[in-house]
Amino acid sequence: MLEIQGVSLETEGDNKVTILKNINLKFFDKKIYVVTGPNGGGKSSLAKIVMGIYNPTSGKILLDEQDITNMTITERSRLGIGYAFQNPPRFKGIKVKDLLKMAASHNPEKFNICDLLYNVGLCAQDYLERDVDASLSGGEMKRIEIATVLARNLKIAVFDEPEAGIDLWSFQKLAETFKNIHLKYDTTIVIISHQERIMQLADEIILMSNGMISAQSERDVILAGILKNENCLCSTNCEKGVGQNAECVG
Amino acid sequence: MLNALDKLMLEKVADLHELPQGAFNIRKNGVGVQRNTTANIDIITKKDKSGIDVIVKPYTKGESVHIPVIVTEEDIHDVVYNTFEIGEYSDVEIIAGCGIHNCGTHTSQHDGVHNFFVRKGAKLKYVEKHYGQGDGQGQRILNPTTIIEAEEGSVVELELIQIKGVDRTKRDTEIRLMANAKLVVTERLLTYQDQEAKSNITVELIGADSSAQIISRSVAQDNSKQEFYFDLVGRNKGRGHIQCDAIIMHNAQVHSTPKISAYHSEAQLIHEAAIGRIESEQLIKLMSMGFSEKEAEDTILSGFLK
């Protein structure tokens, strides 16, 4: 289980801005979580806190009761945490197949690179020898990024807006892929997303706005609340809460 | 006879684990030590100055020529003039390269002046690797000059690589392309410590529908200094593209001077240049895949220079 205890995040410098405010969350094993909410609400920052890209100003992060708050990205990765970028970086001179092999280098399970690419809607024949550089479109980069996370046998996989830039056909494939890796590897999946179809995959949905958890509950409860009151994603209008079991603290 | 050090140097600069098949000429410490020719490729020692003439017969296909140079002693200044006649409609690969092992206190230097005549319809791939090693204080200096005349319909591919260990280099490359000739130049360069590297590449699109693509990638580390000067000249209808990327680290310096000049209304010339450090997102990505920061950095640099 990944537990986030009282985590806050502020920018550095004189004019401090609070990005995350006293976040408390538990991500139980083998579940799919979708974190959603308005832009600027702190979703991506939360994902980066989990991976160790950002260090919290206060609070703790525990993985299976082990305090990983001060661990580096590499150390967290080796404990089984993975992260797919919203805007994946490009690598001049590194081929798609090499990046995927590198991603899988710590995975004892044998896998097929072509299958990985197929799972994210790419034809392996067309991509294996291509460089991970500016010749690839944003959508192609996004799918390869997701494939690098799929290549690893992870305890927790965090995907930051995986659907962005992905066409409809691949989107369907992607949704199936998330289901499959969850079933096959027992991976806990945390997806930052605005898409209802992605939310449909979730066991639980977490609503974030203004750096706080607005609500957290089972998928159907949260989705019903969202459908009733779309403005609930905006914290200033979120007075009635979303659903009977959801606590709306915005 | 080649000793263990010679063989190591040959492996570094020409990927040779044993004597190559086909035509070759191995030069060591300023003199030719071994040579082989074939029915289609002749190698002749120049009479007026130091160097060789490599003559590839027209229509020769799929053969290669290895012409590595190794310098294993200090206080040597070897200058060589090589001329290459690549016959019409031939298709060959030439693997050059120079390795210097200097354990002394005096400079070891090799200057190679290579003139290529790539005849009509011929295809040439020319690979030149430079490498230096040795723990002495003596400098290792390599100054290649490459001049290429590419005739109508010919295709020329150049790979110019400085692997490591070269204290100073000045590369001058001049290429003239005739009608429908095609050129691809790939330059890879790594400098570190106090090394200095200068590279001047001039390409003239003289014939109609000629094309040139120049891709330069370099990494400058420590206190090293790199200077690049690219001059792409469109004298006829044709296309040229220069892409120059450098990764700068520590206290290094990189200077890149692009120049594109058109003398024809249908000349299309592009220059792209970028100098920057390794992006933090690149490091984070690889670290999130289990690499240490050092491993991530090495992986990014080796991929960039591959």
Image (tube, rainbow, N blue to C red):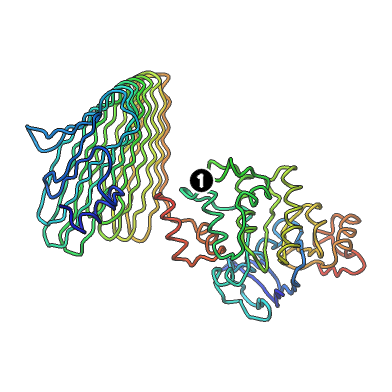
**Percent coordinates x, y for residue A6 in the rendering:** 70, 77
Seen from the viewer's position, the closer of residues B39 and B200 is: B39
Name of the residue lying farthest toward the left = B48
- Residue B135 lies, with reference to residue A135, above or below; the image says below
Pinpoint the chain carrying mark 1.
A
Q: Is residue B83 left or right of residue B94?
A: left
**Percent coordinates x, y for residue A127 in the rendering:** 57, 43
Seen from the viewer's position, the closer of residues B9 and B217 is: B9
Residue B268 in view here = yes
**Percent coordinates x, y for residue B72 in the rendering:** 16, 55
Q: Amino acid at mark 1?
A: Asp
Q: Residues within 10 Å of mark 1 (few under 14, many from 20)?
A: many
- Quadrant housing residue A206: bottom right
Q: Which residue is mark 1?
A: A131
- Residue B240 lies, with reference to residue B166, above or below; the image says above
Q: Which residue shows up at 69% across the image and 53% down it?
A: A162
Is label 1 in a helix, a strand or a loop?
strand
Q: Is residue A21 left or right of residue B90?
A: right
Seen from the viewer's position, the closer of residues A199 and B90 is: B90
- Quadrant housing residue B165: bottom left
